[in-house]
């Protein structure tokens, strides 16, 4: 069973623009997968459909075998989503943001607290737990998005341009965190327009351009070609 599968996925937005033109790929369990392409290629649209945030036009998408439309809750339960933009309640405290998220998946506060504490500690945010999110730096907000995405213990983590606009030091520490998470068994897919990020982190890669997959390969093979 693949962790993620999209088959012949198309998306036409309300204004008539076709952002995806028959995209197909699978991400196997345990993989670290990059969707690499320039701005406007369709990366966010693809992840949006997998996350249940964007309605597909045709084709299919599933997470751990759960169809994102017909079995949306099963799909969502298996998925952690780190969006591109911060979308926190500005006034909610860091710890509460993470615990509230767990509540959407049926976890009580008592069930969520140990996991929230573990995640906030490993992302170096525990000291900030009682601060409202608006007090955090940009780098802290990025880490908070990761903690929030992981609190319900999803098998698959999706990150949309996780290190865009992030300084080199934080980028390195986020890479390290993601490597360890993957080594411990979480399947990861991220979008990036940095080849270097895909090379450093990922095993397999789909290159997307103008709504079409132009190459599906392993990072090793891609490097051997160059
Ligand atoms: P859908 O077709 O999935 O319902 P819409 O076409 O309604 O999506 O778009 C949602 C919102 O995004 C609208 O307000 C739309 O104007 C806006 N939007 C339009 N073009 C773009 C774009 N290129 N990038 C991001 N958002 C856009
Ligand atoms: P990427 O993540 O690779 O930069 P996106 O998936 O965000 O690409 O966008 C793919 C294309 O679809 C772009 O041309 C973008 O302008 C367009 N697009 C994205 N959202 C909308 C929308 N809501 N309405 C219309 N066009 C959109």
Image: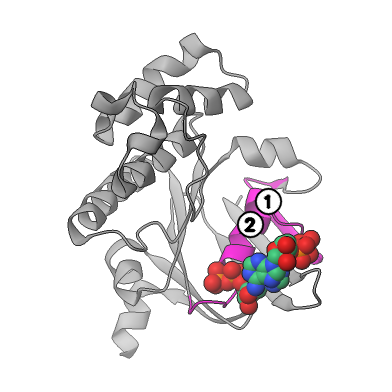
Give me the C-alpha separation between circle 1 and circle 2. 5 Å
Q: Is residue 67 left or right of residue 79?
A: right
Q: Is residue 105 visible?
A: no
Residue 55 in which image quadrant: bottom right
Segment colored magenta: 37-66
Against 119, is 189 above or below?
Answer: below
* Identity of the residue drawn at 22% across and 50% down: 173
Q: Position of residue 118 (x, y in %)?
A: 32, 24
Q: Evaluate if marks 1 and 2 touch, with contact meaning CB atoms under 8 Å apart.
A: yes
**Picture coordinates of residue 64 (x, y %)?**
62, 45
Mark 2 CB lies closer than 8 A to ligand 2: yes
Is 93 left or right of 215, judged from the image as shown? left
Outermost residue toward the left in this view: 169
Q: Secondary structure at mark 2?
A: helix
Q: Residues within 10 Å of mark 1 (few under 14, many from 20)?
A: few
- 163 w.r.t. 224: above or below: above
Determine whether 87 is above or below 170 in the image: above
Count of residue discs = 2
Asked if residue 162 lies in the magenta stretch, the reply is no
Determine whether 72 is above or below 107 in the image: below
Instruction: Identify the residue position indicated by label 1 in the image.
Output: 53
SS under mark 1: loop
Q: Earlier in the sequence, mark 1 or mark 2?
A: 2
Viewer-closest of 142 and 104: 142
Residue 48 is labelled as 2
């Amino acid at each position: 069973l693949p962790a993620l599968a999209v088959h012949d996925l198309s998306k036409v937005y309300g204004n008539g623009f076709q952002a995806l033109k028959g995209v197909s790929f699978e991400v196997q369990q345990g993989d670290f997968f990059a969707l690499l392409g320039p701005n406007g290629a369709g990366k966010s649209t693809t992840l949006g459909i997998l996350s249940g945030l964007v309605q597909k036009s045709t084709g299919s998408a599933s997470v751990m075998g759960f169809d994102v439309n017909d079995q949306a809750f099963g799909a969502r339960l298996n998925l952690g989503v780190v969006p591109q933009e911060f979308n926190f309640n500005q006034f909610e405290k860091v710890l509460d943001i993470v615990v509230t998220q767990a509540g959407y998946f049926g976890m009580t506060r008592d069930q969520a607290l140990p996991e929230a504490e573990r995640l906030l500690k490993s992302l170096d945010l525990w000291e900030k737990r009682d601060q409202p999110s608006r007090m955090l730096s940009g780098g802290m907000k990025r880490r908070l998005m990761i903690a929030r995405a992981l609190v319900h213990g999803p098998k698959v983590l999706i990150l949309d341009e996780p290190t865009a606009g992030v300084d080199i030091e934080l980028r390195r520490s986020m890479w390290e965190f993601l490597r360890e998470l993957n080594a411990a068994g979480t399947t990861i897919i991220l979008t990036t327009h940095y080849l270097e990020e895909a090379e450093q982190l990922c095993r397999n890669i789909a290159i997307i351009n103008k709504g079409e997959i132009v190459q599906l390969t392993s990072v090793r093979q891609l490097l051997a070609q160059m």
